[in-house]
Amino acid sequence: MALLAGVMATYALICWLWSIGFYSTTYAELSGVTAEEITVAELKQTAEYFVAEVNKAGEEVERDAAGVFICDLEQVFSESPSLYHGLPERFAFLTGADIAPKPLVFSVVLSHMNFSGGFFPFTGEANINVQAPKCFIPVTVAHEAAHQRGVIREQDTDFTAIAVCMESDSSEFRYSGALLAYVRLAAALREVSYDDWVEVAGGLSEAVRVDLTANNEYWAGFQTPAADIGENAYDGFLKSQGQELGMKSYGACVDLLVAHYGEME
């Protein structure tokens, strides 16, 4: 009974400190960026935009002897609070305390659960899996920092992370943000038009392909029952909070990306 009471008390605190955000003012109302029905042509155009952006930023970042993206994680963490400074007016609601993320000591645990980061609502800490491929760590830092500033829904948080990275003066953050945007958009495009996906993916530079391959190979090593349990548990939690898409919420940022970046060239 004591154990059951402890679990229920913990869940109640999570609801008060975290889940209540799922029922707060919508992201569209705060930012003016509204997800609308999109066409295949609009999706392809936005994907092509980010192919150009990721190729450009990919030429500016450091790489190891194998051509894989590398960066100074300590510098990434220290620079992360500045991501949310001087943003365009529509993102003014993202103001908040500058709290640097923390590298998780037991990052391998998150890898086994297929998570690149996590927000701890009891202390407001953003924890980052520093063993994951570095190409996505900067945008993961931005993602968890968005949670700290009150963005709760995963599709909104992914979009916010990409947007602030694209506004950054850091090539590492721009590259990481553009890479995540491309991955989300390409996945959506492949589902609706395989030929268009092949055409868009063909525009990626060899350097970007190396990073995507390295990322896929890393996570392939963690396709275990523990990963399935972790994903299913979080998927169930999201759905229990009214997020019908569950883990697919991450990919739902595509509509916001098209709405915000679709007409850029």
Image: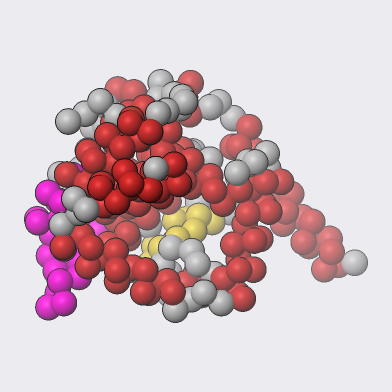
**Magenta residues (range):** 53-78
Residue at point 20%, 60% (across, down)? 208
Quarter of the image holding residue 16? Answer: top right
Q: Residue at x 37, y 55 (%)?
A: 140
Whole-percent x, y for residue 101 in the image = 38, 57
Residue nearer the viewer, 252 or 108: 252
Where does residue 216 sit, x and y in percent of width and height?
Answer: 37, 69
Q: Nearer the viewer, residue 24 or 3?
A: 24
Relative to 185, 51 lies left or right: left
Residue that protrudes farthest toward the right in the picture: 1
Q: Choose between 249 and 163: the one closer to the eye.
A: 249
Which quadrant would the N terminus be assigned to in this image?
bottom right
Q: Residue furthest left?
A: 60
Q: Is residue 93 visible?
A: no
Q: Is residue 169 magenta?
A: no
Residue 129 seen anywhere in this rendered image of the structure: yes
Residue displayed at 22% across by 46% down:
51
- Identify which residue is drawn at 59% across, 37% down: 21
Is residue 70 rendered magenta in the image? Answer: yes
| Position in image of residue 108 (x %, y %) | 46, 77
The C terminus sits in image quarter:
top left
Look at the picture and state if 32 lies above or below 145. Answer: above
Please provide percent x and percent y for residue 56: 12, 49
Dividing the picture into quadrants, the one containing residue 133 is bottom left
Q: Tell me which corner region of the image, top left, top right, bottom left or bottom right, holds residue 220.
A: bottom left
Front residue (pair 205, 174): 205
